[in-house]
Image: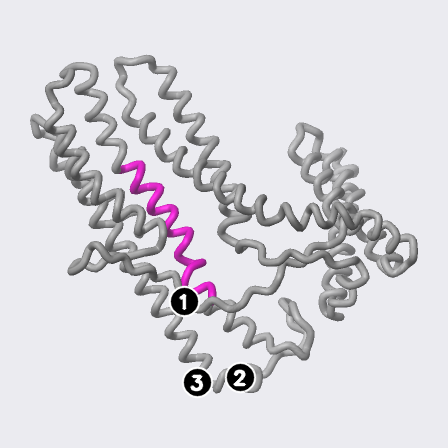
Amino acid sequence: MLIALLVGAVAVTFSLSAHEPNARTVDAVAVPLELAVACWLLSARLERRAQAEEYALVELLLGFGGDLVHAFPRRAHTARERVDAGTPLLQLTAQDLLRMARETPCRATRVAAAWVALVLAVTPVARWMWHPMLYEGAASIAAGALIAACLLPFAVVWGDLRRGRVRSLRDPRRARPWGEGYHPARPPLVLPSVPVMLILFLPAGLLGASWSTGASLAGRINVTEAVFGFWLLAWNGRALVSSAVFRRMERRTAPADGLIRRCVTPAWDLATRACRWSGWSSAALFALALSWPRTLHAGIQGTLTDVSAWLLAVSLALGLLIVLHWQRPVAPRTRSGEELLAELSEAQVRRISVGLNVGLAATMLLIAVLGGLA
């Protein structure tokens, strides 16, 4: 609905000014101002929604005296068990919801709305600027200055929406950040040792490479079966992580563990910047492609559209996998395989065993079905 509001405001402006003699100028002036008002309304609406969610969760937590475990008895053997029986699961869930209520549900909406608003605002401006550059020369400098003055409030409000801020109508110079709610102390990031990483991630990389290539379906399923079989074999022999040989391997690879710890946070920052720059560059190139005049080379428009689509795909992939779900790593620490296994509860061990057995059985059954069809 928020995106529909932005598109609807621009569509109404285009339809009202379609028969005007200076339609390009009217659109280039009115659309940024309308989108500035819409972005301000969106930011205020998202702030109010975040405050309402946080207020409801705080009242729920205080209503039970901060102890949700006795208010809602924990069920045994639930499908989504993630901690052992001695941990207050509902209390941890309430804390997670308090943290998410202020930022996580609104971040994707804010980014998507800001991306659409940027495309809708830049497109009429670029169209109007192409026309005087080709036909009118420098005779429209006054109109260009007027458009620049209208783009300024849009840029300010658009930046506030993207950063999760809202400005008061009485004092526009003061921006009120609304994403500063409940922020619990985050635990340090736990990283496995290099031998454990090789056992976990190397087969996963081979599995992803097999499905991303043009191999046959039977070959991909065979690779999947081999990967699940390897993981199941390694899981059944997990007692070897406490052996002297495995410990010696972890000591030998300790410098690599230190290098990985030092590179985790810079890599996260680099991925975040790449996500942002690719997303906003995609919006700018897409707006330029939509406003490209037909009298110029037509192949450039298709090239701009293709590059914009690739940048948008990169931005979505990085944003969905990294930025929207993972927070900035805090104090990365390396744990040995023995320590990681000691921290697992019985429910987690049971779920991992069942998952690996089901995955291997499913791939074997699929291979048998495909062999019967062949």
Q: Magenta-highlighted stretch: main secondary structure?
A: helix
Q: Which residue is mark 3?
A: 63
At label 3, counting other C-alpha atoms closer than 10 Å, the crowd grade (few under 14, some 14-19, many 20 or more) is few
Residue named by callout 1: 181
- Region rendered in magenta: 99-120
Q: Nearer the viewer, residue 231 or 104?
A: 104
Is residue 16 within the magenta segment? no
Relative height, residue 212 to residue 174 (above, below): above
The residue pinned by badge 2 equals: 67
Q: Is residue 37 above or below residue 97?
A: above
Q: Secondary structure at mark 3?
A: helix
User: Is 222 displayed left or right of 41 in the figure?
Assistant: right
Q: Nearer the viewer, residue 374 or 34?
A: 34
For the residue marked with disc 2, what is the amino acid?
Answer: Asp
Residue 147 appearing in the image: yes
Counting from the top left corner in percent of width and height, residue 238 is at: 84, 58
Kindly identify the amino acid type of the residue bearing the numbered disc 1: Gly
Q: Is residue 114 magenta?
A: yes
Which residue is drawn at the image coordinates 72% and 56% (left, top)?
Answer: 334
| Quarter-of-image position of residue 35 | top left
Vertical relation: 55 (above or below) 19:
below
Q: Residue furthest right?
A: 244
